[in-house]
């Protein structure tokens, strides 16, 4: 069987232990505070240092995707290690140029190595939940056809739902409209956000306060997955208590097979802000 490797980017917010366990290659995006101050997400800037910095300096940084050259270097390095097929799974193309940069690199290397670039149409651990399972299959030397079939299921069955403390970050970075940002600041309304089938942020529902928002998210997940076994991943930006509460509620109501807790990294954090909590879900395989 061909040797298969999995590549993703830092917006997948995959815990380090999972990256190391399944030999996942992670390409960092950059967080830019000024012309002279930028950091590599998860490499030279930890999530903890990032949130401390934006709180102290009261600044919303910009972000930038890797260059095609960075992708080429990674793909070539993996080929030199023996990779014959590379699945490169990335942040929604509606939110970043990362996917486009990867496809440019893919085209430049099409005669050298079999790279399959995938637009996850997701963000944060909704990407990670897909990548981790693909990497496990690759690590177990499953056939390429098995990975392709499972990836097709994952892209159809994975959803993410999230709450933000404020819509200011999303509005400032152009990820959600001003009208929605104003709505979210009124009467303690908590918009429940998700990503559309095309991979764009949109307000799915709303609730008064975080407790009712959690209850509504659990209802949505139950409606979406019914009694099917699911994998879940909870992500948070300095809001572990609420993330744990959300996980416990989902476990009470749904057939949860596995749970991963992770911290939202600097790039996603720059767009959603501190206090954000999200939950990513996908159907487990039926064996």
Image (tube, helix red, strand yellow):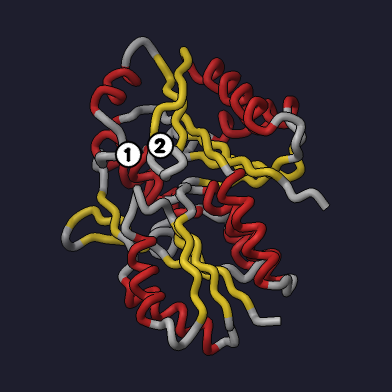
Q: Secondary structure at mark 1?
A: helix
Of 188 and 75, nearer the camera is: 75
Q: Is residue 152 left or right of residue 97?
A: right
Could you tell me if the residues under marks 2 and 1 are in contact, i.e. CB atoms within 8 Å?
Answer: yes
Residue located beneath label 1 in the image: 55
Q: Measured along the vertical axis of the image, is residue 285 above or below residue 107?
A: above
Task: Find residue 92 and report its horizontal and vertical position in percent.
Answer: 41, 51
Residue located beneath label 2 in the image: 274
Of 182 and 60, nearer the camera is: 182
Q: CA distance from mark 2 to mark 1?
A: 9 Å
Which residue is at 76% across, 39% downward?
229
Q: Measured along the vertical axis of the image, is residue 88 above or below residue 162?
A: below
Task: Find residue 130 and report its horizontal and vertical position in percent.
Answer: 59, 54
Which residue is at 46% across, 41% downward?
197
Q: Secondary structure at mark 2?
A: loop
Of 233 and 50, nearer the camera is: 233
Would you say residue 45 is visible in this rendering? yes
Q: Measured along the vertical axis of the image, is residue 77 above or below residue 234?
A: below
Q: Is residue 249 left or right of residue 197?
A: right
Q: Measured along the vertical axis of the image, is residue 1 above or below residue 146?
A: below
């Amino acid at each position: 069987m061909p040797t298969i490797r999995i590549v993703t980017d830092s917006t997948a917010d995959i815990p380090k232990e999972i990256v190391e366990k399944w030999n996942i290659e992670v390409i960092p995006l950059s967080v830019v505070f000024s012309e002279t101050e930028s950091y590599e997400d998860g490499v030279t800037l930890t999530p903890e240092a990032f949130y401390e910095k934006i709180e102290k300096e009261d600044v919303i940084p910009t972000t930038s995707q890797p260059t095609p050259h960075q992708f080429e270097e990674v793909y070539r390095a993996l080929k030199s290690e023996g990779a014959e097929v590379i699945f490169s799974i990335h942040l929604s193309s509606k939110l970043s140029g990362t996917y486009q940069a990867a496809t440019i690199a893919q085209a430049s290397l099409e005669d050298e190595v079999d790279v399959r670039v995938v637009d996850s149409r997701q963000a944060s651990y909704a990407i990670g939940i897909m990548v981790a399972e693909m990497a496990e299959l690759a690590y177990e030397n499953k056939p390429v056809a098995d990975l392709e079939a499972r990836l097709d299921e994952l892209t159809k069955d994975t959803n993410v739902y999230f709450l933000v403390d404020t819509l200011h970050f999303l509005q400032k970075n152009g990820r959600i409209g001003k009208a929605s940002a104003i709505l979210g600041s009124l009467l303690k309304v908590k918009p429940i956000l998700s990503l559309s089938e095309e991979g764009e942020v949109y307000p799915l529902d709303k609730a008064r306060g975080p407790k009712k928002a959690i209850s509504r998210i659990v209802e949505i997940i139950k409606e979406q997955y019914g009694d099917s076994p699911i994998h879940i991943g909870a992500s948070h930006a300095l809001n572990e208590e609420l993330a744990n509460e959300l996980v416990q509620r989902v476990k009470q109501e749904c057939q949860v097979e596995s749970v991963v807790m992770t911290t939202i990294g600097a790039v996603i954090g720059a767009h959603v802000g501190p206090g954000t909590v999200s939950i990513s879900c996908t159907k487990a395989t039926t064996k």
